[in-house]
Amino acid sequence: MTSHFDAFWMPFTANQDFKQAPRLLSRAKDMHYWTPEGREVLDGTSGLWCVNAGHSRPRIAEAIARQAAEMDFAPPFQMGHPLAFELADRLQRLAPEGLNRVFFTNSGSESVDTALKIALAYHRVRGEAQRTRLIGRERGYHGVNFAGTALGGMGPNRKMFGSSLSGVDHLRHTHDLSRNAFTKGQPEHGAELADDLERLVALHDASTIAAVIVEPMAGSTGVLLPPKGYLQRLRALCDKHGILLIFDEVITGFGRLGAPFAAQAYGVTPDMITAAKGITNGAVPMGAVFVKQGIHDAFMAAAPTGIELPHGYTYSGHPLACAAALATLDTYAEEDLLTRGLRMQPTLEAAAHSLKGLPHIVDIRNTGLVAAIEFAPRPGAAPGRRAFEVFLKCFEAGVLLRAAGDNIAIAPPLIVSDAQIHQIVDTLKRVIPTIE
Ligand SMILES: Cc1ncc(COP(=O)(O)O)c(C=O)c1O
């Protein structure tokens, strides 16, 4: 039997299960989705961690439409258009001090590959071409291009794809329920795990290591907050050994933690930041890499004429994406959304931690406008079954959440109200006791 669902090979989806009982969304406005049958669903995950200002905002929609009519495309190689320059300048004002050069991409995965290539090339133009090793971290997620796959730390995402990049190593992850379960905000224990970098330096020699990439708060692997002092220690070790530190802020960028970037929320400045998702409020694909001026300037000094960095995408700084991003930044500014997470944190924190004591819950974590509920895996079942069933039942009950392994992540648009936070948590309170 064929059906019109057959042709689309869906990403990161159990295609066969899905196609037996499709879950479709066909309309969205502000905090809600609607199914094709007209059922209203509260968005508890900002789409996929990207719709930070809420859905289908008129200012953004109009900016995209206007730009599509005005000029659909302009070549980004050896040519420019005004909006890309305006956007880069606006973005660098939001970024941590010093990260004032911006390279445009079309996704988080491309931002990660771009930042890692800049790191390798930076060492090369400075005469340290032997620094080719790249360090990630277990339970990291850096998208799905080859570099991000190799640097990521989720076994299932890596093992099907051969050895991908060579010269890659990983720090241990920092998730430690035995010491930190049910912590509100940053965990107390685990700063010493940053010293793993010293072990890798001892093993490989610092002179071979180009960069370390970590998510300041790991999102896709279940909202893993950095232990107090961990990022500071990693920063100090990178400085000591001449290694670049890259923060992958594809999820944490644009207000999720109550500051424009996690780097600001945690007071640690990396050498590069990778971003995407919230940059256009999810409305047009776009990513960006924020680069310290000194890194950028090393390329300019090394090649006073000619192309300094042979890298870029046909759609780097696409006019529609730039228009969407500028309207998104206006919306964030006008409604003070990039710091709203800080003001809403107490409400989400109290609501999420009120779930403690329900069956199978082994941890609850939160910061800004993000929280996670971790379930013990069901004995004898594949990992993540309980969280996935919670996700399915919440969707049936009118709330969209995200299952990440054994975790349910709550990450609503930054416009969420107190009442909507309570609706999310009340739905979880009804659903969780029904899960075996
Ligand atoms: C930290 C991080 N990096 C990279 C990516 C990949 O982004 P994209 O799916 O836009 O390629 C994601 C996506 O969730 C992410 O969370």
Image (tube, rainbow, N blue to C red):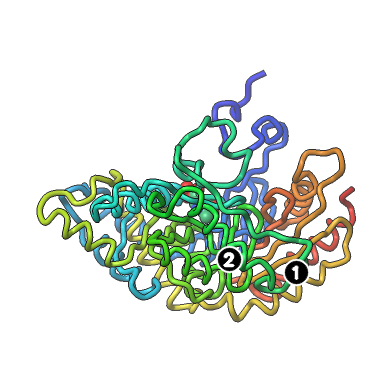
Q: Is residue 159 left or right of residue 95?
A: right
Q: Extreme left residue here?
A: 305
User: In front here: 249 or 188?
Assistant: 188
Q: Which quadrant would residue 98 be assigned to in this image?
A: bottom left
Q: Which quadrant would residue 357 be assigned to in this image?
A: bottom right
Q: Is residue 430 left or right of residue 305?
A: right
**Which SS class for mark 1?**
helix
Residue placed under numbered mark 1 in the picture: 352
Residue placed under numbered mark 2 in the picture: 413
Residue at the (30%, 53%) spot, across then down: 123
How far is mark 1 from mark 2, CA to CA?
16 Å
Residue 199: which numbered mark, if any? Answer: none
Amino acid type, callout 1 = Ala
Can you give x and y, in whole percent of width and height, for residue 156 in the image?
63, 38
Amino acid type, callout 2 = Pro
In this figure, what is the number of numbered marks? 2
Q: Which quadrant would residue 349 be assigned to in this image?
A: bottom right
